[in-house]
Image: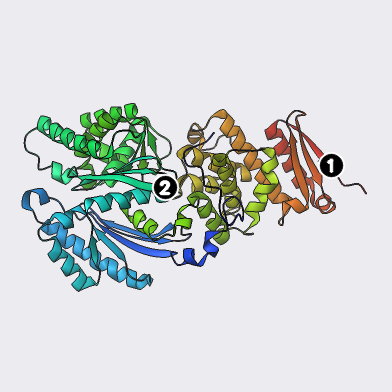
Amino acid sequence: MIGKTEAPRQALADDWDAFGKPLFDDPSARALSRVGVVDVGSNSVRMVVFDGAARSPAYFYNEKVMAGLGQGLAETGRLNPQGRERAFAALKRFALLAKGMDIGPLTCVATAAVRDAEDGPEFQRLVEKETGLHLHVIDGAEEARLSAQGVLLGWPEAQGLICDIGGNSMELAEVGDGRVGRRATSQLGPFRLQQVKGGRKELVAHIRAAVADLAQAVGTEHDRIYLVGGSWRAIARLDMERRNYPLLVLHEYRMEPESLLKTLDWIEKSDLAALRARTGTSQARMDLVPLAALVLRELIETFRPKEIDTSSYGIREGLLYEQMPERLRKRDPLVEACRYSEKVMARMPGFGKKLHSFIAPLFGPVPPEIFRLHRAACLLHDTTWRTHPDYRAEACFDNVTRANLAALSHPERVFVGLALLHRYKNSRAGSRFEPLFALLTPEQIQEAEVLGKAMRFAAMFTIEDPADVGALDYKAKKNALELKLTKRGAGLFGEVVEARFGALAAALKATPVVLRPEG
């Protein structure tokens, strides 16, 4: 199976289909169609404007300034003067951008730097007076909760421990069954750790004691840790570099503890300037990586997780999740995003669901985690039709494997991408994407090829409802693929359609059988 941990909740009250009615037809979802949030952190100040299907929004606008507002705070007790100027300038710009986008008031939160600095309230008042933006200064427990909600936006079935590292603090939160549980905060941000006196031995002892306190607060019985924050993402990118990993998408990048510990050793022994050049990491971010690596090592040794996952979603996405009704939260983010893409990009919106129903007999009963991938591929099968025909197959694969889609593991991305590649192309031999195919088993590659060629055949067969022109029946014991045509279907079954039906049968290693209506 491609993936088990993020299966959708399929029992929905309205029972429109397995995934319910499309969210973009729901007034309460449309009200969330464009939402702006600002996160004033110790290291960065970022504005994000979310747009699109409310359950799985697109990033309409995203701007970050590495202001360093909290640098030196542990030593001076005040916001960094240069960082304060940069953060204020960024917030002034963000307020003007929001007006230009006509998105209404921005939701703004400030975390460790502003809440801990003695001049934090003064900065808060200045920002409101000069820009009209009200900074909601939140405590560590609330920061942990919002970060955890951000992970739940992308992983509805997340089970484990969220670990969000910023410049001056690190928060932990327990998640499971769609809820946030125990939470804890600490001063384990890299800016704080820069002020620890003594050498490496004292620093490690300081980190170990703080992590032990966190373990007391949230427990150690967590199989999975979800990493949130720029320093963690920088380490994950370095892990990809060391492993020569083929898919450079940080969201849902999964690491095994033993392998990650090797990467942490590698980072400690390497020239950081060389690593920065190889990965495109900013100087400001790379400067914090060695300290973050020490914290991550202690987290692994204390909590002993079985898996460590990287999340690109955090407090900003948590603010959006906060505004969603419960019934929206229960939706599958992947399917909702694909539905929205079909609505705005496909030639025949609504065909994807019919296409899925038509080809489903080829696969028989499948578990929910596979069903949703088949549905996603069918919804996306025609969304690159404007691309030049010579590049549609590549565009399909690129769109899925590199798009900002939630609830989709890396192997699942490649599976859907490969199916869509075969939607437009019979053979994958010689493809520049071949290194990515290694993320799939041979059985998964075969299933993706069959799915793609089934879409390729059915999309050519009719532009209306395939059920009106024929029905597929795969008889595995007889090694036969049957197509029973209606009278209308017999007229549509031309030579190109017949060739594609033959290619589908070949992918199944079955004999094609066409049953025509009598008379």
Up-down: is 197 above or below 67? above
**Contact (Cβ within 8 Å) of mark 1 with mark 2:** no
Residue 484 at what x, y percent from top left? Answer: 81, 44
Up-down: is 47 above or below 259? below
Q: Residue furthest right?
A: 519
Q: Is residue 253 left or right of residue 452?
A: left
Residue 421, image quadrant: top right
Quote the CA–CA distance across marks 1 and 2. 48 Å
The numbered dot on residue 515 is 1
Task: Pick whichever, 464 or 270, lies toward us.
Answer: 464
Residue 388 at what x, y percent from top left? Answer: 58, 53
Instruction: Identify which amino acid the numbered label 2 is placed on.
Output: Gly
Q: Which residue is mark 2?
A: 178
Residue 110, image quadrant: bottom left
**Earlier along the polypeptide chain: callout 1 or callout 2?**
2
Q: Residues within 10 Å of mark 2 (few under 14, many from 20)?
A: some
Which residue is pictured at 35% across the width and 64% down the height? 36
Q: Is residue 160 left or right of residue 373?
A: left
Q: Is residue 18 left or right of residue 94?
A: right
Residue 397 at what x, y percent from top left? Answer: 53, 45
Residue 42 at what x, y percent from top left? Answer: 20, 52
Q: Residues within 10 Å of mark 1 (few under 14, many from 20)?
A: some
Which residue is pictured at 36% across the width and 51% down the height? 149
Q: Decide if residue 272 is in sight here.
A: no
Instruction: Identify which amino acid the numbered label 1 is placed on.
Output: Leu
Up-down: is 320 above or below 301? below
Q: Decide if residue 15 is in sight here.
A: yes
Task: Pick whichever, 240 or 58, lies toward us.
Answer: 58
Helix, strand or loop at disc 1? strand
- Assign the N terminus to one quadrant of the image: top right
